[in-house]
Amino acid sequence: MKIKIGMIFGGNDQASIDRTISLVEHFDKNKYDVVPIYISNKQIWYSGKMLLEKDIYRYFDDLKKYARQICLVKKKNHFFIQTVGKLKKDLSVIDIVLPMIDDDMIIGYLKTMGIPYIGSVSLSDKFILKEVLKSQDIATLDWKMYKESVSLKYPVLIKENGKKIKVKTENELKEKINNSDLIIEEYIKDAYKVNLVLLGDSKEQDVGILKDNEDESEEDINQELVNTMTDIAKKIFNLLKVVGLLKVEFIIDKDNIYVDDISTVIDLQSLYALDKKHKNYTNLIDDVISITVENYKEKINS
């Protein structure tokens, strides 16, 4: 019998649609049946196989009538997606959930339901993330909240539509601000980014590395820096009690190492970092799911 994977995506992270559709292509169709769960901008949940077709999102307001508005429910230790409204109908059992969005509220909801899910932790609130890292003496870029008096020198970095952009002047910053709790970070001119990806559990982790600049090889990075980044990434992995996959994004400035971001969301870039030679994404996805399932079984049997 196939394992039913509920993939949650969309919401305010529209890039998650691309991540989800790209990833689904690499699932072992003999082992897994993917059930799409799309969250609209209005926070309404939908399901339907057509949601795994990228083109429909151009006309979603017209086509959403063909998808079913749903919610997750628990019945006698089993989980289902169920239609909402007066005539409720169970559409599919869900064995495990794969969130494709960094969202603390979704993780909290899944924890409350008790449903097994892939991606042990979410720290979508970057203020909390930076405070957690600071408490462990892990360096991050100098930063301020926008509502504070900004003392950073321009240019600075802000996050817009999921990507960090450079802002050169105070006037340009004011034009882009639409969130008074926005984090503004220090910009380092000659710094470069390196991603470290860990796959495993508390006992053992495989490590992959990927430099942000595709024209340069990871072999160009000083091995001492690689060892230090690996130690930091493993420290975060164990601190957050991650089970499965963790990507840690580093900023390197000469010999200074800063943690820029972390994520437990699976994407093809992370899988590529773990297996550049063979690009066997199907086996890696299987590994992530197997590790999660085994950990869940250990918890309920302990």
Image (cartoon, rainbow, N blue to C red):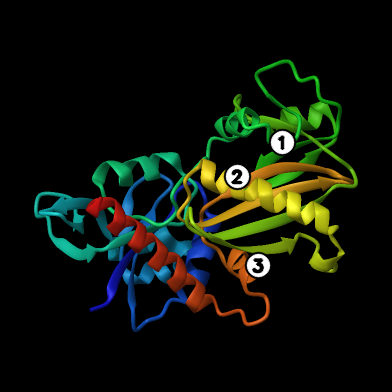
Does the image show residue 24?
yes
Residue 273 is labelled as 3
Query: Which residue was labeled with disc 2?
Result: 235
Residue 38 found in image quarter: bottom left
Q: Earlier in the sequence, mark 3 or mark 1?
A: 1
Residue kind at label 1, given as amino acid type: Thr
Q: Residues within 10 Å of mark 3 (few under 14, many from 20)?
A: many
Q: Residue placed at 21% from the left, 66% from the top?
A: 92
Q: Residues within 10 Å of mark 1 (few under 14, many from 20)?
A: many
Residue 107 found in image quarter: top left
Q: In the rendered view, would you say 116 is above or below 271?
A: above
Q: Residue placed at 63% from the left, 82% from the top?
A: 278
Q: In the rendered view, would you say 33 is above or below 108?
A: below
177 and 65: which one is in front?
A: 177
For the N terminus, which image quadrant?
Answer: bottom left
Q: Nearer the viewer, mark 3 or mark 2?
A: 2
Residue kind at label 3, given as amino acid type: Ala
116 and 98: which one is in front?
A: 116
Does the image show residue 161?
no
Q: Earlier in the sequence, mark 2 or mark 1?
A: 1
Q: Earlier in the sequence, mark 3 or mark 2?
A: 2
Q: Residue placed at 65% from the left, 67% from the top?
A: 273
Q: Residues within 10 Å of mark 2 (few under 14, many from 20)?
A: some
Q: In the rendered view, would you say 214 is above or below 240?
A: below
SS class, disc 1:
loop
Query: Which residue was labeled with disc 1?
Result: 140
**Label 3–label 2 contact, CB within 8 A:** no
Q: Nearer the viewer, mark 2 or mark 1?
A: 2
SS class, disc 2:
helix
Residue kind at label 2, given as amino acid type: Lys
